[in-house]
Amino acid sequence: MELNQRYVYVVALGHFFCDIGMGALPAILPFFILQYGMDYQSVAGLMFASCFLSSVVQPTFGWLADRTSKTWLMPLGIFLSGAAMGMVGLFENYWAIFAVVTVSGIGSAIFHPEAARMVHKLSGTKRGTALSIFSVGGNGGFAVGPIIAVAVITAFGMKGTSIFCLLALVMAMALLVIVPKMKADIEQTSLSDVSLAGKAEELESNLQNNWASFARLTLLIIFSSIVICGLRSFIPLYLVNVTGLSTAAAGSALTLLFMFGVVTTLIGGLLADKIGYLKVVQLSYVLLVPMVGLLSQTTNVFICYALMIPIGFAMFSPFSSVVVLGQSYLARSIGFASGVTLGLSFSVGGVFVPLIGGFADKHGLTATMELLTAVALLAALCSFFLPKPAHLGTPQAKAL
């Protein structure tokens, strides 16, 4: 089966709309402080709720997807994620806001495992390319979400966040129409090639779950997520307090980082299909260590901005490869593997951000960046303990 690029783009667009709301939350938090008088601990609690619950629930939905795959979970997840985030500006009570942020995280958790399973089926022999296209959608949502949030709140006040309800509803309705046809086309394509179907059945019967390798990969994901969430949280603060930039200019560095991440996610997937998934993961994290180390030692604003490019490449280029490796190590539990790799990558690090913040209060931002460099080193070391999945590269796998 060849890569069905048209449908992969459709699922990636769904990923974009799903992650717009999650990406918008950090940009909405300063408005909570300004207009509702929340303190830093309160807004950190909202980030914690969103990240923690999503990282816990998403593997659960992945596990369920392996047992009873339901394609309607994709539009449901998009609707819950966007609609709940759209409601945050309609409440002033902290716990009401806490509740809808939690629901938004659950919606995101519902969408990702089923969507990743669908992309896996559509990818053919181009698994890295397909997953990178899918990942670009999510990264694009994270990049665009803050822009939309700031624009609508500035123009219409806190109630402007309701735009996310409309966006989620439109995309969810579109997927309700498209996904059944997508599923039917996949089944028809598979049945039209009897020899391929036979190979697929034979391969599936021989697949095994390598839980030891997956545990090592999970440890790498946790370390890398801490680095990603830590950099996302502290790069603006570092640029303001160490280099003397304004808040707006420091925020633009983060925008540059994530916008570049959209491009490098795709580059990483294409590269993985050529040189191998494991090599891309190893090269990326080896590059990340000295780049974050350099950032921690410079006070020159131009060097800081320039470092956003290699840091963005090192952070985002291995994303699709990590998902492919996870699916390969747990070849009989694709949904669970997708839930863990996708769920933990951008969420579990958020659980540690309050601890990193406490470290920054005691030791300063330069020491915090040095701490993130050390964590990046741990991720790089973990990558060299990952074995190459046995069935990647077999004739049966290539036929699929």
Image (cartoon, rainbow, N blue to C red):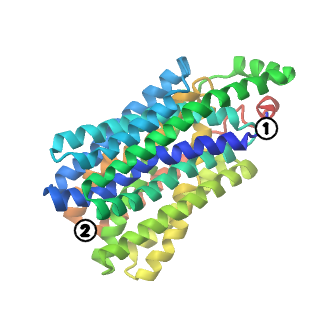
Residue 238 or 9: which is nearer the viewer? 9
Residue at the spot 54% in from the left edge and 17% down from the top edge: 67
Give the left or right position of residue 335, taking residue 159 as reference: right
Asked which secondary structure carries label 2, the reply is loop
Residue 175 or 132: which is nearer the viewer? 175
Q: Which residue is mark 2?
A: 364
Quadrant where the N terminus is found in the figure? top right
Residue 191 location (% of width, % of height): 80, 21
**Residue 34 picture quarter:** bottom left
Residue 279 or 170: which is nearer the viewer? 170
**Classed neighbour count for the residue bearing mark 2: other residues with Cα under 10 Å, few (<14), some (14–19), many (≥20):** some
Residue at the spot 70% in from the left edge and 38% down from the top edge: 123
Asked which secondary structure carries label 1, the reply is loop
Q: Is residue 386 visible?
A: no
Give the left or right position of residue 200, taking residue 361 as reference: right
Q: Amino acid at mark 2?
A: Gly
Residue 283 location (% of width, % of height): 61, 57
Q: Which residue is mark 1?
A: 2
**In this rendering, is residue 334 above or below 246?**
above
Label number found at residue 395: none
Residue at the spot 16% in from the left edge and 45% down from the top edge: 94
Residue 355 location (% of width, % of height): 25, 51
